[in-house]
Image (tube, rainbow, N blue to C red):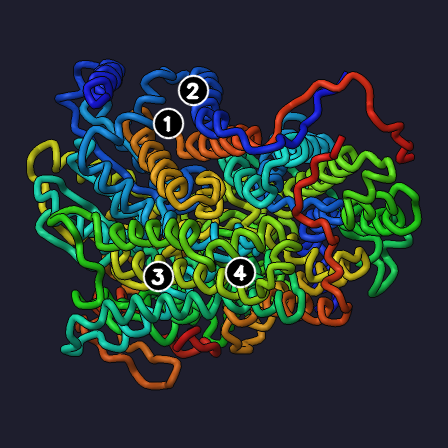
Amino acid sequence: MKKILIAATAAVLATGAGLLGASAADKLKIGFIYLGPVGDLGWTYQHDLGRLEMVKEFGDKVETTFLENVSEGPDSERSIEQLARAGNKLIFTTSFGYMEPTLKVAKKYPNVHFEHATGYKRDKNMSTYSGRFYEGRYIQGIIAAKMSKSGVLGYIASFPIPEVISGINATMLGAQTINPNIKVKIIWANTWFDPGKEADAAKALIDQGADIIMQHTDSPAAMQVAAERGKLAFGQDSEMIKFGPKAQLTSTMNNWGPYYIQRVKAELDGTWKSEDFWGGLKSKLVVMAPYTNMPDDVKKLAMDTEAAIIEGRLQPFKCPIVGQDGKEVECKGGTHLDDGQVLGMNFYVKGIDEKIPGK
Amino acid sequence: MQLVLEKRAERSSAIALISPLIAIGLTLATMSILFAMLGKNPISALGVYFIAPFVDSYSLQEIAVKATPLVMIAIGLSLCYLANAWNIGAEGQFLIGAVAGSWLAVKTQGTDAGPWVFPAMLLLGAVGGALYGLIPAICKVRFGASEILTSLMLVYVADLLLDYLVRGPWRDPKGFNFPTTAEFDPVATVPVLIEGGRLHLGGVIALVVVAAGAVLLARTIKGFEIRVVGAAPRAARFGGFNSNQLILLAFAISGALAGMAGIIEVAGPVGHLQPGISPGYGFTAIIVAFLGRLNPIGILFAGLFLALTFIGGEQAQITMKIPLDVTKVFQGILLFFVLACDSLILYRFKLVFASPKVSRGAH
Amino acid sequence: MGLIEAIILAVLAASTPLLLAATGELVTERAGVLNLGVEGMMIVGAACGFGGAWLSGSVIIGALCGIGAGVLMSLIFALMTLGLAVNQVATGLALTILGIGLSGLIGSRFVGEKISLAPHLHIPGLTDIPLVGRILFGEDAFVYLSLALVIGVWFFLYRTRTGLILRAAGDNHTSAHALGYPVLRIRMFAVMFGGACAGLAGAYLPLAYTPFFIPGMTAGRGWIALALVVFASWLPGRLVIGAYLFGAVTILQLHAQGWGVGVPSQLMSALPYLATIIVLVLISRARTGGSTAPAALGTVFVPDR
């Protein structure tokens, strides 16, 4: 019985190898672990666009594989290890919850290079990478304050993690440069992804007087509600103008392609090193969608701000920063908050009336 | 002329033996068509699903790891189902077990607590799961409330409780606000059986549970009572069995096993408490219980088989770029065929030429 | 538009898919069949509903596609549980797995596409009535359709002979069969009705709520619909109350946050489920001799010949 099994297996593997073609051996195999389905129109969708852009750049030199809908629970370690075992030499794990499993697998496979998105633990063969999404949100804050008639911004947030908190703070700091009395109403959806709930949250915010909708959840539902109600909104993760041609002001887009290209190139050249990459507007990991539905002076202000951030003339978290409690926040970076403070941000700036959930 | 289903006088052991084979054959045929429609070579695709995972010890270990919680939960569920108690809230009992056991892991974190921690966590998990399982059981025997529905509702409550704990009180203070506890200390984790692998003590515990379940059902009076209460409630009443007590017992055991599976999963493959620790184990285990025909040995094989389709599905994504959705469809179709073929053990088809009763119109 | 009016409008829309799916499941369960595959039927309905609307450009065709898909899914269930006497719980769960997979396969073609949403009604004169006009005459047609459906179901169950027979089949299939009623055929139609409603409920999401399809967009609403049927103790009137209460809790929880009321959102979200359990215990207690659940709910029936 066992012999038959082995023979059958060999036959199957041979067929499989035949399908992949003889050139498979000299291609660099690259694996991706996705949290959602590739069609989520948000976080995973953008990672997959980045992967496709990278494939386009290198063509025959690379072969990519992805596993989608990998839950952050007990299965993720196995999924990552399966990719490593399948001969992938560079593996991108694209959600925070994969941090511990990636670390475990990285220790087991010292010759494979791992890249973990949005985490903070690294190893010799495990890099981390993420985006300075707060830079885009600072610009959004300025635009929002200029465009708002009611002086109330509506913010749909997912979970109170530092990335989201720093986004809210950056928005407010930007908005306060235009209108010191601007208000923000925050609704925690407690999900990254439930279009119905995101739409409900957008409706609630508009009904409570917000006339600009911003979101830190993944689907275009909120954009579409704003469009239907004749309000303005910002996209998230991806270009959402299709869902609100008359509503979208801009969108802070996650543009992973250039980073993937750069890392794959390093891998091909043999120069890959474990790093902590945190890219913003300057490195084009964060890209602003075209500024639309706003007068020319606001557009110019937005573009000037973008340029100033890119050139390093402007820091969204420039000191002094006053917390919600009225006390000044320690300024570890000299002229601005240092990266550690932003990465672990757990306070609201002055001007936000609400409290961080669970705090 | 009409094709109708008819109960057999006694269960057919011949069909019992060949029905899984028929089901697998039908599934293979259906899936071959689907793979061909998707432009994939059916033979290599099926090979990846069913044979490739057997090639190496790594995949075999992974199948065992994946099957462990499924088998443990399903054994408990089978007791309930045999007693005609419809516990479909094992997912909630799994989560509560994980929460109860994790409490100790969180409290002893960073202290020099000894190796008693993990056994104690296991016990807490079992107790937590059992107590949570008793809620629908008590609602049923005391008030007559349908346990199908109360146990299902309690799944969501458990899910939200876990969510609250890891986002609030138990959140890792050094974890940048992410919703997870800190990694458990070594004394609070499940020992691994093979160095460098993922096969852990839970696999052994699952086997013990299977053996215990088999003995309980086949060799003990309680096991006999459980089966009689389910199969012939009136006979049970004449026999003087306390059916309420048996329902409570079945739910308690079932909850305890699910809770234990929960804490093993958290203290083993996951390593910390976080939302989403269960990819629906409690629900998948229901299917495992039925696939295994509510028989402990059958459940062991059913659990391993379902785990195989998960591992195979992942390898199909990697080697053949077959989308995950196809694996879901595949699992669904497989389950339908297996359940349908198993039905023929108890029933048979018969051609009737005229309806034996004059049907009085329903209109 | 006043805030209260706006909240009511949002509640109506949020409750409609729940009400639609739950109405179908209520009829199915009244006939004695427990179909736990509502979520699976809904998500396939959503994918097919969107696909139909996108290809044809018509919301109505989309809705019909959603209904058709739900019916097809429910027929698989009927074949298994009625035709082959397979356990209903296991089949329902398997149906959900299948549905999630199928919807992903079908929906992958429509990723990133957008349709125009079902229009809101506008009846000159009526819709413009202050305060109540928008609520009574200004939502999309599905909202009113779902209410009409519940009334229809109530009438059918309690005012027609067929409805009486259906309930009899759900309470005691052996007696119903002995009286010469075709229990299996009645149950099949009940299951199909449940599938049609679930399919339409799923289609409502991309057709009237958010104009795109995303895998998993039903996000557990099918399971909530199952809970609602119990909460309503299998009575159509209470189902309406339950669905709107549930919708109201969902929407008000969001508004409470906007007003800065700090309640742990998990507690708010858990309330409907806890309430359902309590209601279930209370109604079961109130009636001696068991619950108001259809007595034969979830049991297999094979006619004796």
For the residues marked 1 and 2, what is the alpha-carbon distance in whole angstroms?
Answer: 9 Å
Three-letter amino acid code at the position of disc 4:
Met
> If the image is split into quadrants, where does the C terminus of chain A sit?
bottom left
Residue at numbered disc 1: B322
For the residues marked 1 and 3, what is the alpha-carbon distance in whole angstroms?
Answer: 35 Å
Q: Position of residue A335 (x, y in %)?
A: 21, 72
Numbered tag placed on residue B260 in the rendering: 3
Within 10 Å of disc 3 (Cα), the crowding (few <14, some 14-19, many 20+) is: many
Q: How many numbered circles are shown?
A: 4
Three-letter amino acid code at the position of disc 2:
Phe
Within 10 Å of disc 1 (Cα), the crowding (few <14, some 14-19, many 20+) is: some
Q: Are marks 1 and 2 in contact (CB under 8 Å)?
A: yes
Chain of the residue that carries numbered disc 1 in the rendered image: B
**Looking at the image, which residue is at 42% across and 19% down?**
B35
Residue at numbered disc 2: B35
Say which quarter of the image contains residue B120.
bottom left
Q: Position of residue B33 (x, y in %)?
A: 47, 16
